Structure formats: C-alpha cells, structure tokens
C-alpha cells in the first residue's frame, strides 16, 4: 500500500515535468529504498513459554470406618442367667457389723415400773430418751454396754422432760456410755443411709440394729404428736426457723416398741434423730414402713436450755 501511494505521487510529479519511463522507475526504486531505510528495525517480541494447565486431581471420597459390631452370644447369656438369676446386691457403704460394735456402746437400756425403752449418751453424765419412756418416773434403771461383754448397772435420775417434744434427760454421773456426736438434717438429706439401734429386741449389752434411709426431713407446725394434722415445711441449710416449728425425720428403719428414745445414726457416726413413733396412717390412708424421729435441732435447743442459766441439767 505504501509503495503504491509513492508510485502514484511520483508519477503525478513527473507527469507534469515529462521524464522518461526509465527515469521514473529508477526514481521510484530509489525513493522506496530511502523510505524503507527510514523505518526503525522492529525489535522481536519474545513470547512467553506456555505453562501447561495443571490437570485437577480428583480426591477420593473418604469412606467412614465401620463401627465394629458386638456379637452377642445368646447361649452364654442364658447360661449366666440360669447360674445367677438375680443381680448381685450392692455392698453396703459401711460394714454394719463393725459399725454396730462401735456405736452400740453409746446406747443404753432404760427400765422402770415394768416398762422399758432406749436412750443414748449425749454427754458423759447424761442420757437422752423420749418423755413417754420415763413418764411418772423420778429414777430409772440403766444398763450400760461395755467392751468386755459385761453389763454396767446404774441408776439414772430424771432431770428434765418435755411432753410436746417427747424428750427427756436422765442424769447418771460417769455412766460409761460413749457420747454420740450430733448433726442437724435438712430436707436435702432425704435418701441418706442411717442405722437405728434400740432395745425392741436383742439382749442386754447387744441391742437390736436396723439399717435404712431417711425418707424425708421437715419442720411441722405443732408438737411431736400432731404429725398427721400439722402443716409441714422444708428445712433449708443455714436458715433459722421459729421455735414453734418442730423438726421431724422420717425413716424406714422398722422401729418397734422398745426402740423409743434410741438414736438414728448416719454413716459418719452422728446422731441425727431420736426415734419416738411409728406411722400407721397419713391423711386417713394406711402407710407401711415409716417411723418418726425428733430432729436434732430440737434436741440441741432443749439440751442447751437445760444446761443454761436456771436449767435443770446444771
């Protein structure tokens, strides 16, 4: 295209001047060479080496590990069932025989006027029991257990009693029974294991022992004898309550006549209640396996009052 334009322009120029054909062609060739020489030499462009596109790798789909299947041997299970058809009972949290041998030495037999009951050492000189165990008595006969199997006989003097709480304190200096520590229960203690020791049966020096649990613990508005009709309220930890509320501990230890006044002891060896009654009906409905114990707060308050200024236990 460039060459064609150049030829036409030169041809027009010489057409007017009248040069020969040879001169025109020579001039065109010369001009064309000069024109081409005036253009800069093109720098060659280095093309990048093409990088091959990576072929995507298809990752295999992970296969979850199969959960091993436990093969059940039916025949073996049947043989085991026939050999041992009942589940092995859970062992006790404490050895009851060892527990009993230690704490029976805190529990005494109380007798007077042809009746008997149980009491336990609250101090080295005093025994606590139920009021109905010592009714109309000024003095009672005490049988104190010992480690050597011998029975220590002593006289106890009734120093204080309270019919509403069904508690009484008997004095017998250095009686020899081992005082129990005490613990006040709350409603949250329902279900704890306890042991009851009392003289409903057994022989002197070896009272009866039963194991059970605390069914419930609560305050009731009224006296010890108003269990069926009195309103009942929960006992919370670290809470002070009115003195007209009576603490009750319900257990399933199977107390019988003669056990009255005996201790309910937790597995730490603390007296948590004083047995005083059986429950036959609640709200007109028959119940089985419930016994009542005076809560330890009532015992502690009464003991403090009896030992305070003007108290009869001084």
Image (tube, rainbow, N blue to C red):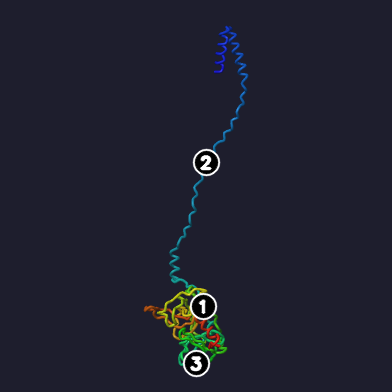
Residue 76 locus on image (x, y percent):
45, 65
Residue 183 locus on image (x, y percent):
53, 78
Identify the residue position indicated by label 1 in the image. 184
Name the front one of labels 1 and 2.
Answer: 1
Whether residue 273 appears in this view of the structure is yes
Crowd around label 2: few <14 · some 14–19 · many ≥20 (10 Å): few
Q: How far apart are marks 2 and 3 (CA)?
A: 106 Å
Q: How far apart are marks 1 and 3 (CA)?
A: 30 Å
The picture quadrant where one finds residue 81 is: bottom left
Would you place residue 46 above or below residue 39 in this image? Answer: below
Determine the secondary structure under disc 1: loop
Name the front one of labels 2 and 3.
Answer: 3
Would you place residue 32 above or below residue 166 in this image? Answer: above
Whether residue 144 appears in this view of the structure is no
Which quadrant, please, contains the N terminus? Answer: top right
Identify the residue position indicated by label 3 in the image. 138
Crowd around label 1: few <14 · some 14–19 · many ≥20 (10 Å): many
Mark positioned earlier in the residue sequence (1 or 3): 3
Mark 1 and mark 2 residues within 8 Å of each other at the beta carbon: no
Determine the secondary structure under disc 3: loop
Q: Which residue is painted at 55% across and 83% down in the image?
A: 179
Which quadrant, please, contains the C terminus? Answer: bottom right
The picture quadrant where one finds residue 79 is: bottom left
Residue 21 locus on image (x, y percent):
57, 8
Determine the secondary structure under disc 2: loop
Mark positioned earlier in the residue sequence (2 or 3): 2
Residue 266 locus on image (x, y percent):
51, 77
Would you place residue 189 above or below residue 171 in this image? Answer: above
Q: Distance between the residues labelled 1 and 2?
A: 77 Å
Residue at the extreme left = 284
Identify the residue position indicated by label 2 in the image. 56
């Amino acid at each position: 295209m460039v060459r064609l334009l150049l030829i036409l322009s030169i041809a027009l120029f010489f057409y007017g001047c009248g040069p020969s054909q040879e001169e025109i062609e020579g001039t065109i060739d010369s001009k064309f060479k000069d024109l081409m020489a005036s253009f800069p030499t093109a720098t060659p462009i280095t093309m990048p080496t093409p990088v091959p596109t990576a072929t995507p790798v298809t990752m295999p789909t992970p296969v979850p590990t199969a959960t091993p299947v436990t093969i059940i041997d039916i025949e073996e299970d049947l043989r085991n069932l026939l050999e041992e058809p009942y589940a092995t009972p859970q062992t006790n949290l404490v050895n009851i025989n060892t527990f009993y041998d230690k704490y029976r030495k805190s529990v005494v037999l109380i007798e007077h006027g042809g009746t008997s009951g149980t009491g336990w050492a609250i101090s080295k000189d005093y025994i606590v029991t139920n009021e109905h165990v010592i009714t109309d008595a000024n003095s009672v006969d005490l049988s104190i257990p010992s480690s050597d199997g011998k029975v220590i006989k002593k006289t106890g003097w009734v120093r204080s009693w309270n019919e509403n709480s069904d508690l009484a304190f008997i004095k017998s200096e250095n009686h020899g029974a081992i005082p129990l520590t005490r613990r006040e229960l709350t409603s949250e203690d329902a279900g704890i294991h306890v042991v009851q020791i009392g003289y409903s049966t057994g022989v002197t020096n070896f009272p009866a022992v039963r194991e059970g649990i605390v069914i419930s613990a609560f305050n009731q508005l009224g006296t010890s004898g108003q269990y069926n009709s009195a309103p009942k309220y929960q006992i919370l930890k670290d809470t002070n309550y009115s003195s007209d509320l009576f603490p009750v501990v319900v257990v399933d230890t199977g107390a019988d006549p003669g056990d009255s006044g005996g201790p309910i002891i937790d597995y730490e060896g603390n007296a948590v209640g004083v047995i005083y009654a059986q429950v036959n009906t609640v709200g007109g409905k028959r119940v089985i396996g419930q016994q009542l114990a005076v809560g330890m707060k009532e015992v502690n308050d009464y003991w403090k009052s009896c030992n305070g200024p003007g108290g009869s236990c001084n």
